[in-house]
Amino acid sequence: MIDKLPQITVAFWIMKITATTLGETGGDWLSMTMNVGYLASTLVFFSLFVVAAGTQLAVKKHYPYLYWTVIVATSTAGTTMSDYMDRTLHLGYTKGAAILVSVLLFLLALWRVTVGNVRVSDIRTRKAEIFYWLTILVSNTLGTALGDFLADDSGLGFFGSWLLITGLLAVILVAATFTRLPKILLFWLAFVLTRPFGATFGDVLTKTREKGGLDLGTAYSSLILLGLLVLSIFISYRAVPPQKRLA
C-alpha cells in the first residue's frame, strides 16, 4: 500500500488552517444561518465524511482534492458535533472539551497499541489509515470545543483567543525546530490547535462588529475560504515535483 497522504510542509499547514476555518464557517452556515439545526447538520456533514473517507480508503494513491475534501468534512462535522454536544445536550464547553480530550487520547493509545506507532509519515496499512481519519475527526471536533471555550468562557473573546492560539503554535514551531521533543507529539498538538485557530479566525470573519468580528457572514466567508483552499491546492501541487507528492 503506497502512502496516500501529503508531505507535512508549510503548504500543508496553510491548507489545513484554511480547511478548518472553512469547516467552522460552513458548519455555522448550515446549522445557524440556514437554521437547519445542530443535529440535522451533523447528520449531513457526517454523511459527507463517511462518503469522502470511504472513497479515500478505496483509492490507491494520493488525490489532493479528495484528501482535502475529507479534511473539510471532518472540520464541518466536527463543528456541528461539538455545537450539538455543548449547546443542544447542554454539556458546556468545558465538559465537552474534556470528553473529547479523553476520546482523542484513547484513540491515539489504541492506534499505538494496535499498529505499533502513531506516525503520520508512514501509514502503510488500511488499519492505520482508518485510525488516522478517526483521530482527525475527533481532533477537529475537540478543536471546535476548545475554540468556543476560549472565545466565550475564558473572557478572551474571538480575537484574543486567536492571538493566544497563534502564540502557542509559534511555540510549537520553535520546539520543532530547536528541540528534540518527539515530532509526532508536536504534530498532533499543532493539528489540534490549528482547529481552534481556524474556529476563532472563522468567528472573527463572521461575527458582528459588536462581538469583535468583521461581520462578513458565514456564506460569504465560506465562499472566500473555499476559493482560497482550491487555489492553495492547485498552486502547492503544481509547485511540488510528482515524485515528492507521495512522501
Image: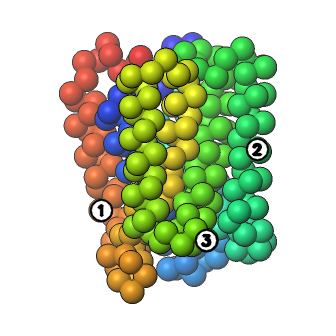
What is the distance, in whole Å, between disc 3 and disc 2 at their CAs? 22 Å
Quarter containing the N terminus: top right
Tell me the mark number nearer the camera, choosing from 1 and 3: 3
Residue that badge 3 annotates: 153
Tell me the mark number nearer the camera, choosing from 3 and 2: 3
Tell me the mark number nearer the camera, choosing from 1 and 2: 2
Quarter of the image for residue 241 reads: top left
Residue 242 versus residue 18: which sits nearer the camera? 18
Is residue 51 visible in this depiction of the protein? no
Residue that badge 2 annotates: 103
Residue 104 vertical placement versus 95 (above, below) = above
**What's the amino acid at mark 3?**
Asp
Residue that badge 1 annotates: 224
SS type, badge 3: helix
User: Which label's residue is closer to the chain start, 1 or 2?
Assistant: 2
- Judge the density around disc 3: few (<14), some (14-19), many (≥20) Cα neighbours within 10 Å: some
Left/right placement of residue 51 relative to residue 227 reads right
Quarter containing the C terminus: top left
Q: How is the image coloured?
A: rainbow
